[in-house]
Image (cartoon, helix red, strand yellow):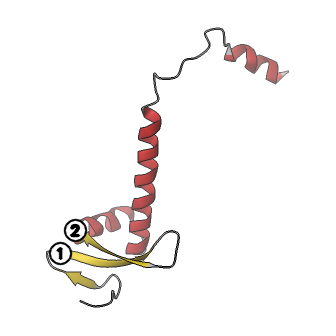
Amino acid sequence: MGQCQGLSDVVENEVKLICLPALATNITSNLAINDTLLNAAFELGGYSSKKETVNTALQEFIQRRKSEELMQLFGTIEYDADYDYKKLRAREQK
């Protein structure tokens, strides 16, 4: 197949070969992405390019995983029973 030519390279089974620069460097990465999923995300998101679609999907994935990690902390943190946020708030307003 040779060098990646970008979004137009088609691979077997409706999968496109996409070249994206690596996050920390200028190295290009070759990814085989399901064409059906990519097109659905592209249309649903109303993005102007497939590169924008992939970058946004990665950002949302990272954000969701971080949120899930925070959710696992619920119920694991012990709070001071004497802490009165209302009293603290009243002091700040004066």
Disc on res. 89: none
Residue with the mark numbered 2? 36
Seen from this angle, which residue lies furthest left?
A: 13
Q: Are marks 1 and 2 in contact (CB under 8 Å)?
A: yes
Determine whether 69 is above or below 50 in the image: above
| Nearer to me, 31 or 44 | 31
Determine whether 52 is above or below 28 in the image: above
Q: Image quarter for residue 6?
A: bottom left
Determine whether 80 is above or below 65 in the image: above
Residue with the mark numbered 1? 14
Mark 1: few/some/many CA within 10 Å (<14, 14-19, 20+): few
In the rendered image, the quadrant that contains the C terminus is top right
Q: Which amino acid lies under the numbered mark 2 shown in the image of this protein?
A: Thr
Would residue 41 appear left or right of 75 to someone viewing this image?
A: left
Mark 2: few/some/many CA within 10 Å (<14, 14-19, 20+): few
In the rendered image, the quadrant that contains the N terminus is bottom left
Identify the residue shown where x is 39% and y is 67%.
Answer: 54
Seen from this angle, which residue lies furthest bottom?
A: 2
Seen from this angle, which residue lies furthest right?
A: 94
The location of residue 48, given as percent across then percent down, is 43, 74
Q: Which amino acid lies under the numbered mark 1 shown in the image of this protein?
A: Glu
The location of residue 16, given as percent across then percent down, is 25, 77
Identify the residue shown where x is 14% and y is 75%.
Answer: 13
Would residue 37 appear left or right of 52 to someone viewing this image?
A: left
- Between the residue at mark 1 and the residue at mark 2, the CA separation in whole angstroms equals 7 Å
The location of residue 18, given as percent across then percent down, is 33, 77
Please tell me which of labels 1 and 2 falls first in the chain.
1
Would residue 63 appear left or right of 45 to someone viewing this image?
A: right
The location of residue 73, given as percent across then percent down, is 46, 30
